[in-house]
């Protein structure tokens, strides 16, 4: 029961940062993704998600899934991923879920402000 919320649905962006300040991680090596809501002019950090990096992972004989799939699944509810670098396989897997991938070496603060001010992610249809 409950009334409809007056707040809009969050626009989530995953940022690969090793230090919380800069966009420092390659998608395939990222151990943490900060998840930001950029739906308003005041971006807010929602959570930090721990990742099992797809590149350089210890692939034991019991591991059934491609490690890159684990990383992609971790950010599947986001509209965009911002990383220092990302390979073609990562870009393609994210694109299948209608998730944009951006490469930058900028600060987290600068990136989230720019995305919050931009209409780019608001215009995209959710996956």
Image (cartoon, rainbow, N blue to C red):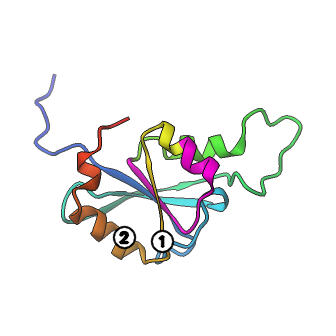
- How far, Cα to Cα, is label 1 from label 2? 9 Å
Are there few (<14), some (14-19), or many (20+) residues within 10 Å of tag 1? some
Residue nearest the viewer, comparing 99 with 29 = 99
Give the x, y percent position of residue 34: 46, 61
The kind of secondary structure element at disc 1 is loop
Name the quadrant of the C terminus: top left
Quadrant for residue 73, please give it.
Answer: top right
Name the quadrant of the N terminus: top left
In the shown orientation, is residue 117 left or right of residue 52?
A: left
Give the x, y percent position of residue 17: 53, 69
Asked if residue 77 is positioned above or below residue 28 in the image, the reply reads above
* Mark with earlier residue (1, 2): 1
Are there few (<14), some (14-19), or many (20+) residues within 10 Å of tag 2? many
**Residue at horizontal 14 percent and vertical 38 percent from the top:** 5
In the shown orientation, is residue 10 left or right of residue 59?
A: left
Asked if residue 92 is positioned above or below residue 46 in the image, the reply reads above
Marks 1/2 in contact by CB < 8 Å: the verdict is yes
Quadrant for residue 108, please give it.
Answer: bottom left
| Residue 111 disc label | 2
| Residue 126 disc label | none
Residue nearest the viewer, comparing 78 with 7 = 78
Give the x, y percent position of residue 122: 24, 49
| Residue 69 lies in the magenta-colored region | no
**Residue at horizontal 42 percent and vertical 77 percent from the top:** 107
**Residue at horizontal 23 percent and vertical 43 percent from the top:** 9
Asked if residue 124 is positioned above or below residue 85 in the image, the reply reads above
Disc 1 target residue: 104
The kind of secondary structure element at disc 2 is helix
The residue positioned farthest toward the right in the image shown? 61
What residue span does the magenta drawing correspond to?
Answer: 79-93
- Nearest-to-viewer mark from 1 and 2: 1
Give the x, y percent position of residue 97: 46, 37
């Amino acid at each position: 029961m409950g009334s409809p919320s007056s707040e809009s649905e969050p626009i989530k962006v995953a940022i690969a940062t090793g230090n919380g300040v800069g966009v420092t991680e390659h998608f395939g090596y990222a151990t943490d993704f900060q998840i930001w809501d950029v739906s308003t002019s005041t971006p807010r950090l929602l959570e930090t998600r721990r990742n099992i990096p797809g590149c350089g992972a210890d692939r034991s004989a019991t591991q059934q899934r491609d490690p890159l799939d684990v990383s992609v699944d971790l950010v599947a509810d986001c509209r965009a991923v911002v990383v220092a670098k990302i390979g073609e396989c990562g870009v393609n897997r994210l694109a299948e879920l209608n998730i944009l991938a951006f490469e930058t070496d900028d600060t987290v603060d600068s990136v989230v402000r720019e995305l919050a001010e931009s209409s780019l992610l608001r215009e995209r249809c959710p996956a």
